[in-house]
């Protein structure tokens, strides 16, 4: 075997070493292939000498370990390994004992190369342990961020997240109406509207509030028409209280005495001209 072929062979062995239960192990199937015997024959030889193979030498994966390993390893290479049964695995000590059990020259020589591969793998892990820990931390952070993004996207799709500020332009009448309607629907206890120019369209928006939510309007002047509109509204819907207040130039909606929305246009004129909120 040339130096290049030997290097490729040793690399192929290292690629067959996996980490299970904190041990570096090789599958019974891979070892059987290297030794030129059937997997069944390999495991039978172990069972005949079971006292030589304690659990830190040789054990069978459990179902969850196998499922996790298969999802990470087998499917990544197209499920070409043909594994149908949960495999047994050998640690470095198990491989050394296996050469004694099989009692063949090829088993002894191969076991030496395999053990060397285990040693090289262990050195590699020890040397790069900090890097692996950092990669694990990065992976955990990415998973956390994925969950947060999924939650944000779900909330956006459900309409629970609303923009905190922005501009709505002229002709965006429905967009502006829906935006304010959603704000009204979000109230759990109370809604306070401060707007110097109020008409029945504002009452229509307030009709969308949840049952039991108190609604009040402060406006510059309560005209006879507005008073009539409010009285008719209160006969059909949960009442809205309207009071005169001329101390504000801008327009506000206060939700549950906690969240304040500021509008550059009166609610009755939303979408007629562009405005900021």
Image: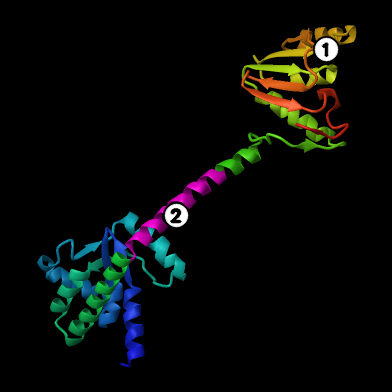
> Mark 1, residues whose alpha carbon is within 10 Å: few (<14), some, or many (≥20)?
some
The image quadrant that residue 134 belongs to is bottom left
215 or 136, which lies in front? 136
Q: Are marks 2 and 1 in contact (CB under 8 Å)?
A: no
Whether the magenta-drawn stretch holds residue 69 is answered as no
Where residue 88 appears, as percent x and y from the top left, is 26, 66
Q: Quadrant of the N terminus?
A: bottom left
Give the left or right position of residue 245, taking residue 153 as reference: right
Mark 1, residue position: 220
Q: Earlier in the sequence, mark 2 or mark 1?
A: 2
Mark 2, residue position: 138
> Mark 2, residues whose alpha carbon is within 10 Å: few (<14), some, or many (≥20)?
few
Q: Quadrant of the C terminus?
A: top right
123 or 65, which lies in front? 123
- Residue plotted at (20% across, 73% down): 95
Q: Nearer the viewer, mark 2 or mark 1?
A: 1
- Label the magenta part by its dominant secondary structure: helix
Q: Is residue 180 above or below residue 217?
A: below
Q: Is residue 131 above or below residue 109?
A: above
68 or 209, which lies in front? 209
Q: CA distance from mark 2 to mark 1?
A: 57 Å
Where residue 85 appears, as percent x and y from the top left, is 32, 64
- Under circle 2, the secondary element is helix
- Residue plotted at (27% across, 59% down): 22
Where residue 127 appears, as percent x and y from the top left, is 31, 67
Give the left or right position of residue 268, taking residue 255 as reference: right
- Residue plotted at (27% across, 67% down): 25
Whether the magenta-drawn stretch holds residue 149 is answered as yes
Circle number at residue 86? none
The magenta span reads 128-150
């Amino acid at each position: 075997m040339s130096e290049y072929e030997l290097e490729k062979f040793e690399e192929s062995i290292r690629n067959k070493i996996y980490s299970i239960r904190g041990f570096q192990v090789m599958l019974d199937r891979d070892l059987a292939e290297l030794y030129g015997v059937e997997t069944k024959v390999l495991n039978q030889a172990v069972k005949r000498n079971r006292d030589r193979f304690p659990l830190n030498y040789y054990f069978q994966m459990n179902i969850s370990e196998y499922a996790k390993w298969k999802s990470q390893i087998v499917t990544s290479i197209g499920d070409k390994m043909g594994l149908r049964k949960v495999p047994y695995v050998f640690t470095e000590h198990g491989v050394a004992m296996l050469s004694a059990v099989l009692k063949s020259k090829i088993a002894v020589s191969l076991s030496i190369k395999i053990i060397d591969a285990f040693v090289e793998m262990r050195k590699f892990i020890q040397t790069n342990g900090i890097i692996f820990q950092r990669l694990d931390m990065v992976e955990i952070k990415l998973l956390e961020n994925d969950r947060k993004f999924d939650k944000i996207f779900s909330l956006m799709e459900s309409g629970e997240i609303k923009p905190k500020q922005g501009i709505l332009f002229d002709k965006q009448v429905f967009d502006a109406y829906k935006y304010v309607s959603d704000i009204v629907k979000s109230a759990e206890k109370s809604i306070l509207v401060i707007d110097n120019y109020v008409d029945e369209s504002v009452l229509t928006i307030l009709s969308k509030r949840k049952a039991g939510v108190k609604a009040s309007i402060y406006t510059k002047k309560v005209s006879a028409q507005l008073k009539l509109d409010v009285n008719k509204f209160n006969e059909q819907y949960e009442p809205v209280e309207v009071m005169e207040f001329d101390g504000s130039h801008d327009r506000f909606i206060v939700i549950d005495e906690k969240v304040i929305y500021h509008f550059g246009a009166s609610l009755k004129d939303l979408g007629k001209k562009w405005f900021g909120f």
